[in-house]
Amino acid sequence: MSDAAGPVVLDGFPASEGIARGRVLCVKWRVPEVPHLTVPEGERKREIERFRRARRRARRELEGIKRDTEDRLGPIEARIFDPQILMLDDPEVVEGTRRYISRSRLTAARAFEWRMLELKERWSRTSHPMVLDRLNDLEDLKVRILSRLLGLAAPWSLEGGAEEVVAVARNLTPSFVARLEPSRVVGLAADGGTRASHWAILARSLEIPAAAGLGNVSTRARDGQEIIVDGVSGRVVIDPDAKEADRFERRRAAIREWRHEEAASPRGGPVALDRQGVTLRANLDLPGEAARAYRLGAEGVGLFRTEFLVVGRGTMPGEEEQYRAYRTVAEAFPSQPVLIRTFDLGGDKFPVFLRTPAENNPFLGRRGVRVCTDEPELFLTQLRAILRAAAHGDVRIMVPLVNTASEIGVVRKLLDGAAEQLRGRGVEFKLPVRVGAMIETPAAALAAAHLATRAEFLSIGTNDLVQYTLAVDRTSTGLAHLFDPFHPAVLRQVSMVAQAGRAAGVEVSACGEMATRPLGALLLLGLGVQALSVGWRSLPEIRRLVRNCRLDRVRAAAAAALEESTGAQVKRTLAASLGGAEERLFPAGT
Ligand code: PEP
Ligand code: MG
């Protein structure tokens, strides 16, 4: 494997930004062996009672973790544990197990294990990431309850290992990640999961760099091996050679230095060497990140992903709660734009309370603005909360997965309705607010000139634009090598959208992962995108990148890249035209 062959490089999904280097510590899941035992007729009741008690203990444990998470990270992060807690009373779980105990006289452990196997079998028939996440929660619950019933110790361990370790696992769970100490566990790498996985949300909140969807990192890595995790690109390197390790250390040192320098430098967008300014905003998932992004110099928020307010919820978050969250973000950026994206539900993020029937292609189904306009109650509540928060800052509304200008029209009508409701209640709010469209589909990109007549700004969501342009599922580990933001078809659409925005006089920004990666950020700027919104932890890197480039050269490089016919050629042309500037700045080559 790696020793003789040199470093092992695996590419997955960026799950939590930042870079880390440490020693591998494989997470050992002790999935208990359950003997096939039956109980005498008269002991069935006792087994049912043991099962009830094991569930009660598991509930207490999970509620304890939830409380600790709330103290440590906040209420939104804590709610991630609700689905698991709810699952403890799920009739599918409870009744199914009881049936095996009473009808087949199985021990509680065996009956529960069988029931869990059945449910897993049923749920694994989907590739829906949301369901797969639920499956992950189910596994956590299964091991927790079986350990209790069989009188075993904690289901997983991170014992031993060096000071700074990277936890490597087949799958990670929220209860595991919530209790990590970032000074010891400096990085995470998992075979499964995506950026939207519950554990990844917690990793971001704890600021532990993580890569997900790596396919087989858990079988490639061994305890004690050296490993680098790049949570920006989603890459891990096991057993890095001296050159790789040196590149990493230089990059880490540079980032540290930039953070200090950026903290000390005056606020405002970075200015390139040829004195042209660039607007740099932050992508946020949780309200608590707003103050941190401000300290790193963000000039506002280019994407606030509001879906994370509904993660793990059994019910819709109310207007008041949403208003508080949006207001927190608005107030963190006095007089700077805060683009609140309305719920982008569907695809890989579906809350249980919507009870949506299973879809064969969730990413092509009810998603984004379609859900909002189909569920006016849900949407009006969100719009009211946003309008109220708008009274406290420069709040703008960004609509996801738009295909046509008429969808923006529907949103505006609903906004009027929401304002009417607030007026009736005599509550403070602000209207008009600017309404913009995300450009995430080829349809939207091709119709950008038309959309720009109805929308007051456009923001390119490159994650989805790449997925829908190339017909490559953004959550598929097996297809990750085909997910290419540098594909000429993507470039042409970005260029077309930038031109359409310029012609109509509306701002065009970009907020997908592509903007967070150096070469991608330069390419977007070169193609005419005016503002970048990047994962907030990457702000110092991208600021530094802009300050060290000449935008006229970047534009010439992008123009040359537009002529190329493959993604690989595009990257080569860019790198050559920029004289390797981004490679000198970012030696780890993200
Ligand atoms: C995108 O699609 O690029 C985007 C920013 O939105 P999300 O990743 O939340 O779908
Ligand atoms: Mg998107």
Image (cartoon, rainbow, N blue to C red):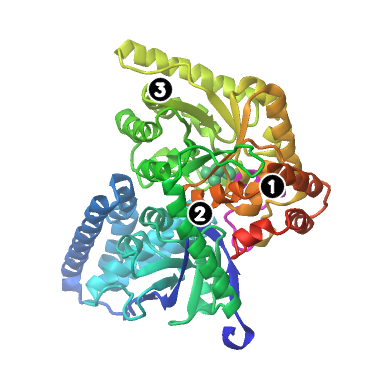
| 429 falls in the magenta region | no
Q: Nearer the viewer, mark 2 or mark 3?
A: 3
| Segment colored magenta | 463-478
The numbered dot on residue 129 is 2
Q: Nearer the viewer, mark 1 or mark 2?
A: 1
Q: Secondary structure at mark 2?
A: helix
Horizontal relation, residue 60 to residue 463: left or right? left
Type of amino acid under label 1: Leu
Answer yes or no: do the residues labelled 1 and 2 have beta carbons within 8 Å? no
**Residue 265 spot, x, y in % from top left:** 45, 45
**Residue 280 spot, x, y in % from top left:** 54, 40
Type of amino acid under label 3: Leu
List the residue tagged with mark 3.
387
User: Residue at 50% of width from left, 48% of height from top?
Assistant: 539
Q: Nearer the viewer, mark 1 or mark 3?
A: 1
Label 3 crowding class (10 Å Cα cut-off): few <14, some 14-19, many 20+?
A: many
Q: CA distance from mark 2 to mark 3?
A: 32 Å
Residue in the foreground of this view, choosing between 339 and 276: 276
In this rendering, is residue 474 above or below 99?
above
Q: CA distance from mark 1 to mark 3?
A: 35 Å
In this rendering, is residue 209 above or below 380?
below
